[in-house]
Image: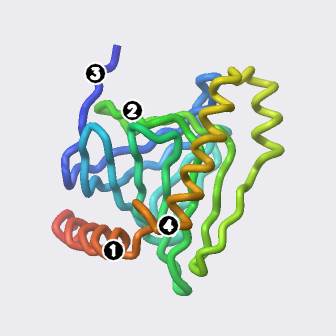
Amino acid sequence: MVKESIPKEGQVIKIQSYKHDGNIHRVWSETTILKGTSHVIIGGNNRTLVTESDGRTWVTREPAIVYFHSEYWFNVICMFREDGVYYYCNLSSPFVCDEEAIKYIDYDLDIKVYPSGKYHLLDEDEYKQHMKQMNYPKDIDVILRRNVDILQQWIERKKGPFAPDFIKVWQERFHSIDRRNS
């Protein structure tokens, strides 16, 4: 059994996303930890190698801040582009972290938030397909639907990672830690 651990500020760690059936979905090769507690992990990455389940690889295009919470069934990626901050929110299991990586189960549904504040729920067809294929229990569906609502409230109220101060603080922290690690 793998021992859970809390990553330390400045530590570089992988992020591993799984599917409900236990198969690996996607791996980000490195993320720098900006804050690590038993409830919240905030990290930063830039031009990070990502490996898909089929072995294909790609590199992220822009700096990003990632936000994980142990009590919510979603995580948030804040991507910094020339025209503003975009958010990609994965409906997922709460994270677990061990010495190898930050890990979670990806449940297909996503919300994309644009710099204007507009947002869209994505991948509902994929969610329905995987729900049948992988036999998601009914209680998982109820939890995920409730967390879609919570996430939409956070977006509309600019709470958590959607707060303007969140972006400013963690982007500055990432740059200062990134410079120290170079």
Q: Are marks 3 and 4 in contact (CB under 8 Å)?
A: no
From the top left corner, tell me how far across and down residue 131 is, in percent.
Answer: 76, 29
Q: Are marks 3 and 2 in contact (CB under 8 Å)?
A: no
- Mark with earlier residue (2, 4): 2
- Mark with earlier residue (3, 2): 3
Q: Is residue 62 left or right of residue 120?
A: left
Label 2, on which residue?
A: 96
Alpha carbon distance from label 4 to label 1: 13 Å
Label 3, on which residue?
A: 3
Alpha carbon distance from label 1 to label 3: 34 Å
Mark 4 closeness class: few <14, some 14–19, many ≥20 residues within 10 Å? few
Vertical placement of 149 versus 6: above or below? below
Label 1, on which residue?
A: 165
Alpha carbon distance from label 2 to label 4: 27 Å
- Mark with earlier residue (3, 4): 3
Q: Secondary structure at mark 1?
A: helix
Q: Which mark is residue 157?
A: 4
